[in-house]
Image (cartoon, rainbow, N blue to C red):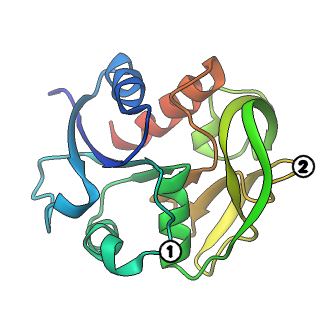
């Protein structure tokens, strides 16, 4: 089988090289595009889409409309990381709220029956660098991981195609293993 390709949408993250490196470590080729330049369709070029974190608030629906249209119009797995998850959640009607500033490793309880968590224990340590939190899963989604400060650390669409992580999975060993679980979905 040919090497799977992942379209990485750069939403202004500071850790784009680390994210791409992690996906490439897992055997995927990556191409990067910014949110304002996403293609209208994937046309079979990519087996998955990953949305990076963002320095910009996820509330700008007009700016992110082409990205949301792409995500909703494709049939490949999609993974939003930190701000990428928040963009997806806000587009679906989710609400973000300010919370404590978290920088560093934090423990999160995950739903082990989810394929995303095949390679991790029920409690993972993931890297956080943010102050905004999704308060509840929007309609059509559910929380599949939680922590003290974040009731929705991980998010999954009802059909299982769209996933999200509050944490930056490009850091720490558990983050890599969660990305390995995501890679199983598009291979």
Q: Nearer the viewer, residue 161 or 150?
A: 150
Q: Is residue 108 above or below residue 143?
A: above
Q: Is residue 67 above or below residue 131?
A: below
Tell me the quarter of the picture where residue 134 sits: bottom right
Residue 156 is tagged as none
Q: Nearer the viewer, residue 49 or 149?
A: 149
Residue 38 point in image, percent of width and height: 19, 60
Query: Counting residues from the N terminus, which is met first, the one under dot 2 or under dot 1?
Result: 1
Could you tell whether 64 is left or right of 99 in the image? left
User: What residue is shown at x 50% (from left), y 32% (from top)?
Assistant: 179
Quarter of the image where the N terminus is located: top left
User: What residue is shown at x 52% (from left), y 79% (from top)?
Assistant: 92
- The residue beneath circle 1 is 59
Q: Examine the rendering and report whether any part of residue 159 can be seen.
A: no
Discs 2/1, front: 1
Q: Neighbour class for label 1 at 10 Å: few (<14), some, many (≥20)?
A: some
Quarter of the image where the C terminus is located: top left
- The residue beneath circle 2 is 148
Could you tell whether 144 is left or right of 39 in the image? right
Tell me the quarter of the picture where residue 27 sits: top left
Q: Neighbour class for label 2 at 10 Å: few (<14), some, many (≥20)?
A: few
């Amino acid at each position: 089988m040919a090497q799977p390709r992942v379209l990485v949408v750069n939403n202004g993250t500071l850790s784009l090289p680390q994210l791409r490196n992690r996906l490439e470590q897992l055997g995927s080729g990556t191409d990067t595009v910014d949110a304002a330049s996403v293609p209208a369709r994937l046309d079979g070029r990519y087996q998955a889409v990953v949305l990076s974190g963002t320095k910009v608030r996820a509330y700008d629906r007009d700016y992110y409309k082409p990205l949301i249209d792409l995500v909703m119009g494709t049939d490949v797995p999609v993974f939003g990381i930190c701000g990428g998850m928040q963009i997806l959640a806000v587009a679906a009607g989710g609400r973000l709220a300010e919370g404590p500033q978290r920088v560093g490793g934090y423990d999160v309880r995950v739903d082990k029956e989810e394929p995303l968590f095949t390679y991790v224990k029920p409690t993972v340590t993931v890297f956080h660098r943010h102050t905004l939190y999704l308060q509840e899963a929007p309609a059509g989604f559910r929380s599949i991981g939680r922590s003290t400060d974040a009731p929705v650390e991980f998010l999954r669409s009802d059909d299982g195609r769209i996933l999200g992580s509050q944490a930056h999975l490009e850091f720490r060993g558990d983050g890599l293993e969660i990305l390995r679980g995501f890679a199983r979905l598009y291979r």
